[in-house]
Image (cartoon, helix red, strand yellow):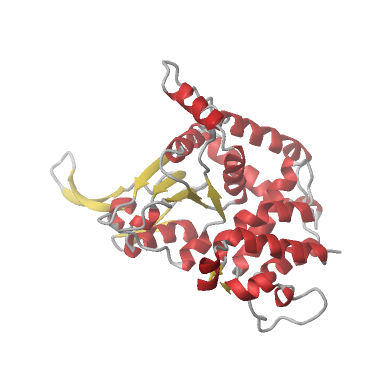
Amino acid sequence: MSTQNLPDAVMVGDFPRLFRRLQAEVHKAIIGQETSVENLLIALFAGGHVLIEGVPGTGKTTLVKALGLALNLSFNRIQATVDLMPADITGTRVLLSDSEGRREFSFQPGPIFCHILLVDEINRATPKTQSALLEAMAELQVTAGGRTFSLTPPYFVMATLNPIEMEGTYALPEAQVDRFMFRVRLGFPDEVGLARIVSATTGADEAVIEPVFAAEEAAGRVEQMKRLVRQVMVVPEAERYAARIVLATQPAPVRGVSDGPGTRTAAQNDMVSRYVSFGSSPRGAQALILGAKVCALLDGRVNVAFEDIERIAPIVLSHRIMLNYAAHSDGVDASAVLQQVLASVRSARP
């Protein structure tokens, strides 16, 4: 690695401080959910998007508002419904008149034009509308009225899935699910947490979130932190470890992969062979490394360790593993499969 590509020492020291400050500001509005909030911020600085699962009332909308206020970035919310059309989120051309009476079409941006976007119950939107969102997530652009409009970075999408109601929903295409770097679950609070929520939201005082960045520098500072994440060093052994974990999620040998020692763990993994239809895509390995880089910076390091990859693996790979009917019949979920995958790969770790 060349000298100019080495991480800046000052920024390395600032990164965990700014990260924890952002986390503390968000928690002024969000009670509990410490791990989930941390994972959301990891995805933000890793340059990915997040799929959130949680029952209604767990604070998903409050979370995106708090994050936008703490970062001092623009944020919008879209409630997905069956009749939601692509133009409702991307924007459309409307006929306007100027001061001289001349009339012309002008593009009016939709709610997708922001820095932080919450798409509530994304699986209620039709595939046509979902595809418009996919373009924004993947290409950082929007096509409307035959023209292409660029989105301003940083751009961060949080989409929620309601695990209770499945009627009137459209399953997300696998390609779109794969575009989400993490899948994060917002759990139901316990008795103490629920009491704290009630106390904080039913009184006269409201949480005041202080922006961590000034408005004129917010976008630039976030992008600077994202660039720092990219500069964290990864040794070949760590890259191969991430690749080995992804390969271990495959239920059958992958063509073009050698059968050298330690290369195929899935062949000896009974759970994967029995319950998995399709394993993670190569994007899973990319997400493992990017998420691990953020974890390394939070620990004050500029190099990725095996433990960083293992820490991030469950939220990176759980939504990238397709289970078969036998798994559903036996009550086996992706987290149980991943536990065995990580255990088998860890046992062969150098």
Q: Nearer the viewer, residue 342 or 116?
A: 342
Quadrant housing residue 125: bottom left
Residue 26 figure quarter = top right
Residue most extreme to the bottom: 255
Q: Is residue 280 depicted above or below 18 in this figure?
A: below
User: Which of the image's four quarters has the C terminus?
Assistant: bottom right
Q: Position of residue 310 (x, y in %)?
A: 72, 55
Q: Which residue occupies the foreground of this view, 207 or 338?
A: 338
For the point 78% across and 56% down, the residue is 306
Q: Residue 230: in sight, yes or no?
A: no
**Farthest residue, direction front:** 330
| Residue placed most toward the observer, 180 or 171 | 171
Horizontally, is 289 left or right of 99 in the view? right
The residue lying furthest to the top in this view is 204
Q: Residue at x 79, y 45 (%)?
A: 301
Question: Residue 32, percent across and down?
Answer: 57, 33
Residue at the image point whose x is 45% and y is 20% from the top: 206
Give the image location of residue 7, x and y in percent.
76, 47
The quarter of the image holding the N terminus is bottom right
- The answer to whether residue 223 is above or below residue 249 is above
Q: Is residue 346 left or right of residue 46?
A: right
Most extreme residue toward the left, as rendered?
101
Res. 243 visible in picture: yes
Left or right: 86, with 67 as reference point = left
Which residue is at a point 71% across and 68% down the rendered structure image? Answer: 243
How many callouts does the rendering have? Answer: 0
**Residue 346: percent from the left, percent from the top?**
79, 62
